[in-house]
Amino acid sequence: MPQSRPNILFIMADDHASHAISAYGSRINATPHIDRIAAEGMRFDNCFCTNSICTPSRAAILTGTYNHVNGVTTLSTHLDGRLLNYPKVLQEQGYQTAVVGKWHLGHGGIHDPTGFDFWDVLPGQGLYHDPEMIRMGERTKRSGYTTDLITDYSLDWLRGRDRDRPFCLMVHHKAPHRSWEPDDRHANMYEDEDIPEPETFDDDYSNRAAAATAARMRVESDLTAEDLKVPVPEGLTPAEEKSWKYQRYIKDYLRCIASIDDNVGRLLDYMDEEEIAEDTIVIYTSDQGFFLGDHGWYDKRFMYEESLRMPFLIRYPREVAPGTVNGDMILNVDFPATFLDCAGADIPKSFQGCSFRPLLQGETPDEWQTSMYYRYWMHGAHHNVCAHYGVRTLRFKLINYYGDPLGQEGAIGPKSEPEWELFDLEKDPCELNNVYADPDYAEVVTQLKAELKRLQEKVGDAKYGSESG
Ligand code: CA
C-alpha cells in the first residue's frame, strides 16, 4: 500500500551552475549521482531565479514570494521567521519537517528557521572544514568536512523519523560556494588535466552596457590569494596567468561538486534501502547559477544566462516519467506552491508562484508563463554589480540597469547612469551583442517594456516603474 502523500527530499547546493552537471551536458565534469535523478525523473531546462544571490533566492524558495514582498532583497536583509513558508503549511498537514546545512537567512530571534521540527544550520556562510553549526538554537563546533556532515545529520534525522508520517527534508549544501575548499578525498582530482575554457572566456565586454565592464568578478584580476590558495607562478604572460587562475579556480569548484555528488548518492542509496524511492519526491537544485569563467567571470548576480539559470532535477516515480526533459519556464518562487500541490495541501494566497505539478505529469497548461521578472538589488556591493531588473521571455531578454542603491541595506552608492540591454537569445545565446539600440528591434523593445511593466504590476514591484533610462 503506497503512502498517500509523498515525502519531499529537497537537496540544494550553493552556486552550483547547471553547466557543471553532466545531465545538463557539462563539458567540464561528471556528476553520476546527480545525473541519476535526471535519468529516473525530469530535467527542467528553463528554471530561473528571480534574484541571483544566496539569501534572497532562499527566501523566495521558502516563502514563494518575490524579494520586494518578503523583504529579503540583499545579503544584509534577513528573513522574518514570522512570515508564512511552505514547511509551516506541511507541518499543519502532519508532515515532519527538517532543514540541515546552509541557511544564510539570519539567525537568532525572528531569523531562526521556523516551520521545521528539526534544524541544524551553519551560521552565515559557514566553513568548509570543522564548522560550527546551530542545532535548534545551540551552537557547537563539529569535526569533519561540511558536505559530508550535512548528509550525515540528514541521514540521522531520517533514521529517527516517524515512519507513519510523510517528511520534508531540506538538505542545503554550503558547497560549492567560494572559497571552494575541497576535501582530502577529492583534492587531487583533475590534477593531470586541463579543464576546457568556456567559449566566452576572453569576452572584452564591448557591445554591452557599462555594467559588464564595471563588474569586479574577473578571473584575471579579482580572484584573491585566498581563492587561489597557491602563489601565481612567475614569468607567465597575462593570458597564461588568466588561464592558470581559471584552472586553479575551476578545479577546486569541481572538486567541491564531486563531494556533493557522492553525498547525493548516499541519500539516494538510503531511499532505496528504505524502499521509499517510489513515495519520495527528490529534487536537486542550486540557489542560483554561476559564471564558470564565462565572460571571463566567476560569481553570479547578473541576469545573464549562466547566473540566472538554476539546475532543477526532480524524481517522483508516481508522477514523473523517467528520463524526461521539460523546456517550460519555471521559477524559484514556484517551488513551494508545487511542493504543496504534490502534498495535497492548499496553496496559501500569499504565495506568488504557481504550481508546476502539471508539467511533472507531462501536461503544459495553455496559459503557462512564457516570461519572467528578475531583480538584483545589491547595487555596488561586493563585486560592483549594478542594480538591475528585467524581463526574460523564451527568446528575448531586456535588462534595465537602473543604477541606484535606493536605500537598500546591503546596497551602496554611487548611483550609475541608467542603461538598457536587449539580447536576442536565439541569435546570440552567449549574450555578446546588446541590440537595444538596433532599429530592427525597436518593436521588440516596445513589447518587452510593456511586458516588464505588466510583470512589475503583477508581482507588486511597480513602485520604481520601468521608465528610467
Ligand atoms: Ca548561492
Image: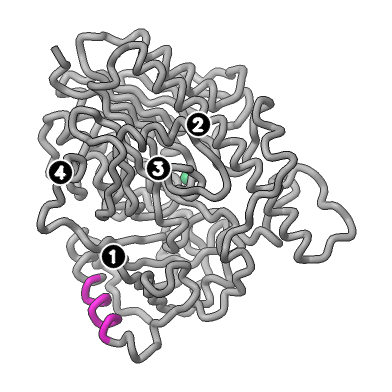
Q: Considering only order in the chain, which callout, 3 or 2, is on the residue closer to the N terminus?
A: 3
Q: Given this view, does label 4 or label 3 mark the residue nearer the observer? A: 4
Q: Amino acid at mark 4?
A: Pro
Q: Earlier in the sequence, mark 1 or mark 4?
A: 4
Compare marks 4 and 3 and give the one earlier in the sequence: 3
State the mark number for residue 78: 3
The secondary element bearing badge 2 is classed as helix
Cβ–Cβ below 8 Å for labels 1 and 4? Answer: no
Which residues, given as a range, are shown in magenta?
A: 443-451
For the point 65% across and 43% down, which residue is it? 251
Q: Which residue is mark 1?
A: 394
Earlier residue among tags 2 and 4: 2
Label 1: how many residues lie within 10 Å, few (<14), some (14-19) or many (20+)? some
Residue ID at (30%, 46%): 325
Which residue carries the number 4 mark? 358
**Distance of label 4 from label 3 (alpha carbons):** 33 Å
Residue furthest right as drawn: 235
Question: What residue is pinned by disc 2?
Answer: 261
Question: Do the numbered discs 2 and 4 sit on residues whose CB atoms are within 8 Å?
Answer: no
Query: Mark 3 Cα within 10 Å, few/some/many (few <14, many 20+)?
Result: many
Where residue 160 appears, as percent x and y from the top left, is: 35, 8
The three-letter amino acid code for the residue at tag 3 is His
Which quarter of the figure has residue 111?
A: top left
Q: Nearer the viewer, mark 2 or mark 3?
A: 2
Residue 267: x %, y % from top left: 41, 21
